[in-house]
Image: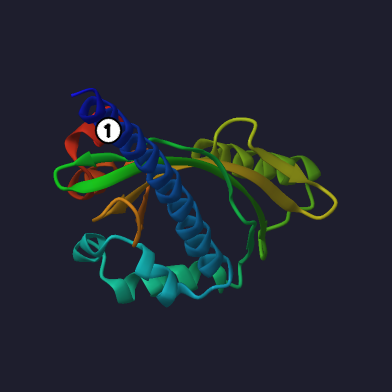
């Protein structure tokens, strides 16, 4: 009896340790996938980057339209746009909900934007007001204090802080991603379980 009890305790301890290692591996796989996804975007390999997005998203916005939109951002002659690699802040616990696994990721990255062909006035005060209005519009998207205008280079330097969800069928591999944009809650509600979107 004692041997059976000891074996049972040993088996439970080994299983717990295995689960912890698997959880750690799963988070590592999630982070690697997320960085690979972002690298493809930075390298403008948009078609490949979409393999990391939820297939259900393309029922809302067709895949070909997404590629066109991404190309328009990066190839717009009126905008110089440069995005840095993301820094992952925190990866939440992997939770099983309705047969899929979810983990929230907080991350940040830096963007440089330069608006070409902006109307310049002979009135310096008018130019400064236009720059401030544009900075305020960008701050509405990226948050107060996260946008700095560089008068010398005429770049807007932006620090973007975001959240995303990683979604996997098995909780370990083949991670897909959805970026959390609060003003697109109606889209997120079609892609994520209610308990993940109700507090947005």
**Residue 55 lies in what quarter of the image?**
bottom left
The residue positioned 81% from the left and 55% from the top of the image is 153
Assign the N terminus to one quadrant of the image: top left
Residue 145 shown left or right of residue 166 in the figure: right
Q: Nearer the viewer, residue 154 or 123?
A: 154
Q: Secondary structure at mark 1?
A: helix
Residue 37 seen by the camera: yes
The residue positioned 67% from the left and 64% from the top of the image is 116
Give the number of callouts: 1
Residue 121 shown left or right of residue 14 in the figure: right
Residue 115: percent from left, percent from top = 65, 59
Mark 1 is surrounded, within 10 Å at the Cα level, by few (under 14), some (14 to 19) or many (20 or more) other residues, namely few
Residue 142: percent from left, percent from top = 54, 40
The residue positioned 34% from the left and 41% from the top of the image is 19
Q: Residue furthest right?
A: 152
The colour scheme used to paint the residues is rainbow
Q: Please say if 139 is above or below 66.
A: above
Residue 197: percent from left, percent from top = 25, 35
Residue 86: percent from left, percent from top = 59, 51
Q: Please say if 76 is above or below 118.
A: below
Assign the C terminus to one quadrant of the image: top left
Q: Nearer the viewer, residue 5 or 157?
A: 5
Q: Nearer the viewer, residue 75 or 4?
A: 4
Q: Please say if 94 is above or below 119.
A: above
| Residue receiving disc 1 | 7
């Amino acid at each position: 009896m004692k041997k059976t009890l000891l074996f049972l305790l040993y088996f439970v301890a080994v299983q717990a340790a295995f689960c912890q290692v698997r959880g750690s591996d799963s988070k590592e796989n999630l982070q690697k996938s997320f960085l690979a996804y972002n690298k493809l975007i930075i390298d403008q390999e948009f078609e490949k980057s979409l393999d990391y997005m939820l297939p259900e998203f393309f029922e809302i916005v067709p895949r070909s339209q997404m590629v066109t939109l991404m190309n328009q951002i990066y190839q717009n002659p009126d905008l110089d746009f440069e995005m840095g690699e993301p820094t992952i802040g925190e990866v939440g616990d992997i939770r099983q909900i309705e047969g899929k696994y979810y983990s929230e990721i907080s991350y940040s990255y830096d963007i440089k934007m330069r608006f070409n062909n902006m109307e310049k006035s002979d009135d310096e005060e008018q130019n400064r007001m236009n720059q401030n209005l544009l900075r305020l519009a960008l701050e509405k998207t990226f948050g107060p204090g996260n946008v700095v205008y560089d008068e010398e280079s005429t770049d807007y330097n932006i620090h973007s802080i975001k959240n995303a969800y990683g979604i996997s069928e098995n909780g370990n591999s083949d991670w897909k991603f959805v970026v959390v944009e609060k003003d697109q809650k109606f889209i997120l509600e079609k892609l994520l379980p209610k308990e993940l979107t109700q507090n947005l």
